[in-house]
Amino acid sequence: MSKIYVTGLGPGAADQMTKKAEKVLEHCPVIIGYTVYIDLIRDQFPDKIFLSTPMRKEAERCRMAFEEAEKGRDVAMVCSGDAGIYGMAGLICEIGKEYPGIGIEVVPGITAASGGAAVLGAPLMHDFAVISLSDLLTPWELIEKRLDAAAQADFVICLYNPSSRKRADYLEKACGIILRHRSPETVCGIVRNIGREGESYEILSLERLRTTQTDMFTTVFIGNSQTMELNGRMVTPRGYKDV
Ligand code: SAH
């Protein structure tokens, strides 16, 4: 039975890919994914058949993977970061119901939250919530509700998909909601191009974050009430004991 390996590549750097992911890519003759991710690995695996579809054609991309697997060859469906965090693992499992003869294995990777946290220092040492600001698949009202609840409960908040050209003011709106419960001085961090060329980061207050422009290659970290800046690093203490 041929198999689809839904594989997280990590944030970008070759040495941040797991050994298992590398083995899977070596093993599978066919590699499918969004063009940006395929471009990250094309040079490393020159002999593979690479297939792709544009950004918003995820279901089509999954069907393509099953059709290739039905031809009798193993397929790697690649995603950035972790395949099961805003990746393709869920859709492959859903569509997999229609293809009972094809095996599915999910291969995890380093997600942007942990890759970016390492760049900033140690912002995720205590309870944290991960929220995507993309309203393509989630109604904005629900995103607002989750932002409000996470801010109220003093979670460190990690934001994926903080903005795009069409959603230029979403980060500003999100910060506005969080400011209902948090001080404008709350320590925040942004990391761009984690593990890729042009990796950069900044530590700034929630007030300043509110008017900062980000893009779709940025992950945003909003500290909890205890988070501090220590020698240029964003650090959340492990506990609240001495408060
Ligand atoms: N499956 C991915 C997330 C995909 S959602 C993962 O686990 O990391 C896409 C969002 O993830 C981007 O908009 C950005 O917020 C974040 N992201 C993914 N890779 C990134 C990188 N290399 N640098 C900064 N942010 C990244």
Image (cartoon, grey):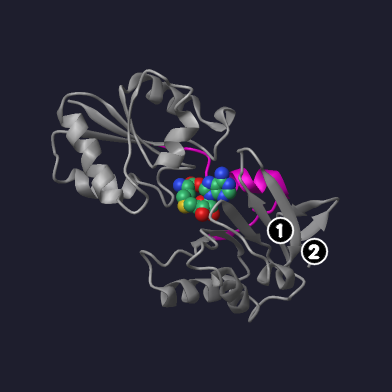
Q: Indicate whether residue 44 is drawn in magenta.
A: no
| Amino acid type, callout 1 | Gly
Mark 1 lies within 8 Å of ligand 1 (Cβ measured): no
- Residue 54 vs residue 128, the one in the foreground: 54
- Residue at figure coordinates x 80%, y 63% from the top left: 242
Quick one: 238 or 35, which is closer to the camera? 35
Q: How far apart are marks 1 and 2 (CA)?
A: 8 Å
Which residue is found at the position 55% from the left and 28% from the top? 14
Q: Which amino acid does label 2 sit on?
A: Asp
| Relative horizontal placement of residue 33, taking residue 174 as reference (left or right) | left
The quarter in which the C terminus is drawn is bottom right
Residue designated by label 1: 239
Give the residue drawn at x 63%, y 49%: 192
Please, what secondary structure does the residue beneath circle 2 have?
A: loop
- The answer to which of 185 and 193 lies nearer the viewer is 193
From the image, tell me which residue sits under label 2: 242
Residue at image location 45% in from the left, 38% down from the top = 37
> Bounds of the magenta span?
107-129
Tell me whether the residue at label 1 lies in contact with that at label 2, contact meaning CB atoms closer than 8 angstroms. Answer: no
The correct choice, above or below, for 172 with respect to 188 in the image is below
Task: Pinpoint residue 142: horizontal percent, then vertical percent.
Answer: 42, 74
Q: Residue 205: horizontal and vertical position, in percent?
A: 75, 67
Residue 67: give x, y in percent of width and height: 17, 35
The x, y position of residue 109, in whole percent, is 48, 38
Q: State the residue in front, 94 or 167.
A: 167
- The answer to whether 156 is drawn above or below residue 113 in the figure is below
Q: Can residue 215 be seen in this view?
A: yes
Residue 140 falls left or right of residue 52? right
* Residue 125 lies in the magenta-colored region: yes
Q: Counting other residues with Cα less than 10 Å from the Cα at mark 1, is it few (<14), some (14-19), or many (20 or more)?
A: few
The image quarter containing residue 239 is bottom right
Quadrant housing the N terminus = top left
